[in-house]
Amino acid sequence: MNTQTLLVLFLMAICTVQAQKIDPEVESMAIKLESKVIEWRRDFHENPELSNREFETAKKIAKHLNSLGLEVTEKVGKTGVVAILKGDKKGKTVALRADIDALPVTERADVPFKSKVKTTFLDTEVGVSHACGHDTHTAILMGVAEILAKNKSKINGTVKFIFQPAEEGPPPGEEGGAKLMIKEGVLKNPDVDAIFGLHINSGTDVGKIRYKPGGTMAAVERFVINVKGKQTHGSAPWTGVDPILISAKIIDGLQTIISRESPLVNEAAVITVGKITSGVRFNIIPESAEMIGTVRTLDPKMRALIIRRMNEMVPAIAKAYGAEATINFQNNTSITYNDPDLVKQMLPTIQSIAGKENVLLSKATTGGEDFSYFQEVVPGFYFFLGGKSPSTKNAPSHHTPDFYIDESGLLLGVKVMSQLTLDYLNAQ
């Protein structure tokens, strides 16, 4: 056998070793745990709880984590649960996050574990259901915790499991979600070096994973515009200042920020006015009008530009028509920004487990996710896990009564999150 042949065989052997990324014991444990993960998911699904009210959900999570011998802290960010697993060797700290709250949506999906829970939300009686898949995220991370807890000898560093409440937003007048957990020090003691998270997706086939470096989900701003005009009789508009007409001019002007000032070749951006309230009678020009809407951005510079121009434009348009107007913003999420270097480092792990052909580079979405607040503090990687049966043509959207997830997709989530953790910590 000549030298060239030996070199080729050696390189092939290296490639084979590199391609076999998943730890055989991790894979075996994940397969054995699949039915347990599905059982947990069904229990959470049948017993959903709204944001900042996840009391029983948190108890179940804490009980499992305590049974694994982890250092468990409860009531973080009101109802959150955090657990720490220290490996046998020192190293970095990686955080894994799952959101645990449900939505005020009455479920219609025909499953044996269908939610029948009802509650009062904003003075309205509603059903409660996991119409966004947070129950799957929780069950997956519980499975990951069990696998890693039984593989301490393979961990160079520390794993922090974050079960986060109120991802959908806390009730009015309350704090909650990732912001509150960060405020209470969830990324400290020990300091987190990187964080991973996933989201099940009802529109992506089981077995596939979607990802995007950089901005992958939008920053979400809620804005309120108040226009003050001058009330008068509808038959004599020249004797007053019409806030409804001025509101229309403001809406028209705001859209030019998107169409004429925003570099949309970089990233998408949206300004939407979703509600206008004004007037009481057909023949009265009212004194005031209120508009409520949202801004969605995927690029920090574009976000700053759009908010600055809205602040400039709204009072200026109103003044031009003889009125006054104010605009106030409330930040709901920041940009879910996947650190490009972290994505580049960890992508081979995901590709080796799911298969390179099943890991899809995708476009950004203008939906929001408060995982973004963690990523403002530490590098993070957030990706989408397939939850749609390939035989399903038109899968119901998230946040709808008919939302449905194929549970066979959960196993891949357990495998990927477990191996990502090991590979990140052991790459040191």
Image (spheres, helix red, strand yellow):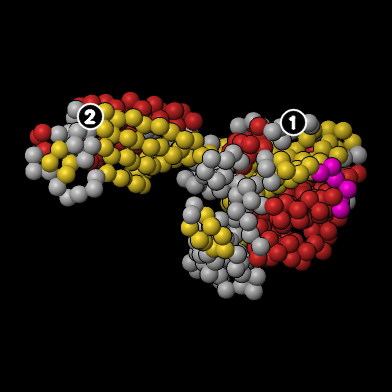
- Which residue carries the number 2 mark? 323
Q: Mark 1 points at which residue?
A: 188
- Tell me the kind of residue under disc 2: Ala
Give percent across and percent down for residue 51.
60, 49
User: Which one is in front in this view, the residue at disc 1 or the one at disc 2?
Assistant: 2
Report the number of discs.
2
The quadrant of the picture occupied by the C terminus is top right
Q: Give the residue displayed 34% in from the left and 35% down from the top.
A: 225
- Asked if residue 199 lies left or right of residue 31, the reply is left
Secondary structure of the residue carrying tag 1 is: loop
| Residue at x 79% of width, y 42% of height | 73
Instruction: For mark 2, give the secondary structure.
Output: loop
Magenta includes 71? yes
Direction from residue 393 to residue 245 in the image, left or right: left
In the depicted structure, whether residue 47 falls above or below residue 419: below
Label located before the other in sequence (1 or 2): 1
Q: Which disc is residue 151 wearing?
A: none
Taking depth in this image into account, of 42 and 381 the one nearest to the observer is: 42
Could you say which is closer to the camera, residue 38 or residue 269?
Answer: 38
Look at the image and give the residue range highlighted in magenta.
67-72
Q: Which residue is drawn at 69% across and 46% down?
A: 79
Task: State the CA–CA distance, disc 1 to disc 2.
Answer: 49 Å
* Residue 336 sits in quarter: top right
For residue 140, side relative to residue 102 (left or right): right
Counting from the top left corner in percent of width and height, residue 52 is at 62, 47
Callout 1 amino acid: Lys
Indicate yes or no whether the magenta region holds residue 5. no
Name above or below for residue 53 compared with residue 271.
below
Question: Which percent across, then down, holds residue 115?
Answer: 61, 67
Residue at point 73%, 62% (across, down):
40
